[in-house]
Amino acid sequence: MIFLYKNDLPDEFLQAIKTSVAVDTETMGLMPHRDRLCLAQFSLGDGNAYLVQFFDYSKANNIMRLLSDAKILKIFHYARFDIMMLYKYLGAMAKNVYCTKIASKLSRTYAQKHSLLDLCKEVLNVEISKEQTCTDWGSESLTEEQKEYAANDVLYLHQLKEKLDVLLKREGRLELAKSCFDFLETRVQLDIMAGDNYDIFAHGA
């Protein structure tokens, strides 16, 4: 089932979390210094998705509490972007994170594609649609197609983590992956500080 809320998650959702939660975001575009955060999606890995539309960021107290809780694992796909957008607009840095995109790139080195669509298809044998990728997430009312698209971005992350952990362990890269996940907080802070045209890790003067 898909549940839709405004500005924040309900208290009951936080109370239902055991050890981990899948997280994703939708924005007006892919330029963090221009495009605003519109939607955040969550799942406990139980087949349900919880969507939160943002109209007032200051009211997202439960989401901020969740992101800051280091005891709860937050599972993302391409965490670097999602963490940055959540931090920029909600002011809460996600602690204790896992990125399925990083895990895939470290373990599935035979593959050239590491998108969520490709991972779901190969690793889980699940077909998901990406037709709503370019859509107006800032609209006051979301269509059923948008809701389904947003839900799919979190519904399979727990399963993917489980499968990718097996591969990471097999290839001896589980600890390396954890180090990458831990570095994401610093990477996000650098992204925000540097803007769109500067990377301290880039070659050059």
Image (spheres, rainbow, N blue to C red):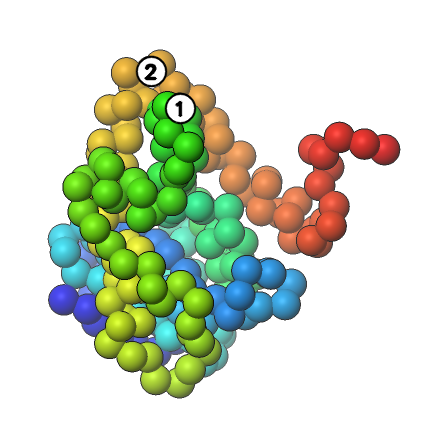
At x 59% / y 41%, what residue is drawn?
187
Closer-to-camera residue (161/89): 161
Measure how far apart labels 2 and 1 are at the Cα level: 10 Å
> Residue 20 is drawn in which quadrant?
top left
Amino acid type for the residue under numbered disc 1:
Thr
Give coordinates of residue 156: x percent, y percent. Answer: 23, 48
Quadrant in which the N terminus appears: bottom left
Question: Going by the image, does 75 lie left or right of 36?
Answer: left
* Vertical order, 172 against 157 (above or below): above
Q: Look at the numbered disc 2 and give the secondary structure of its residue.
A: loop
Mark 2 surroundings: few (<14), some (14-19) or many (≥20) residues within 10 A: few
Q: Nearer the viewer, residue 77 or 193?
A: 77
Q: Residue at x 49, y 74 (%)?
A: 58
Q: Residue furthest right?
A: 205
Q: Secondary structure at mark 1?
A: loop
Using the image, determine if residue 101 lies above or below residue 24: above
Q: Residue at x 42, y 72 (%)?
A: 135
Query: Crowding at label 1, few (<14), some or many (≥20) Cα neighbours within 10 Å?
Result: few
Whether residue 186 sits left or right of residue 116 in the image: it is right
Residue 125 seen: yes
Q: Nearer the viewer, residue 184 or 128?
A: 128
Contact, CB < 8 Å: mark 2 with mark 1? yes
Residue 39 percent across, percent down from the top left: 40, 69
Q: Which mark is residue 171?
A: 2
Q: Is residue 4 left or right of residue 183?
A: left
Residue where numbered disc 1 is placed: 109
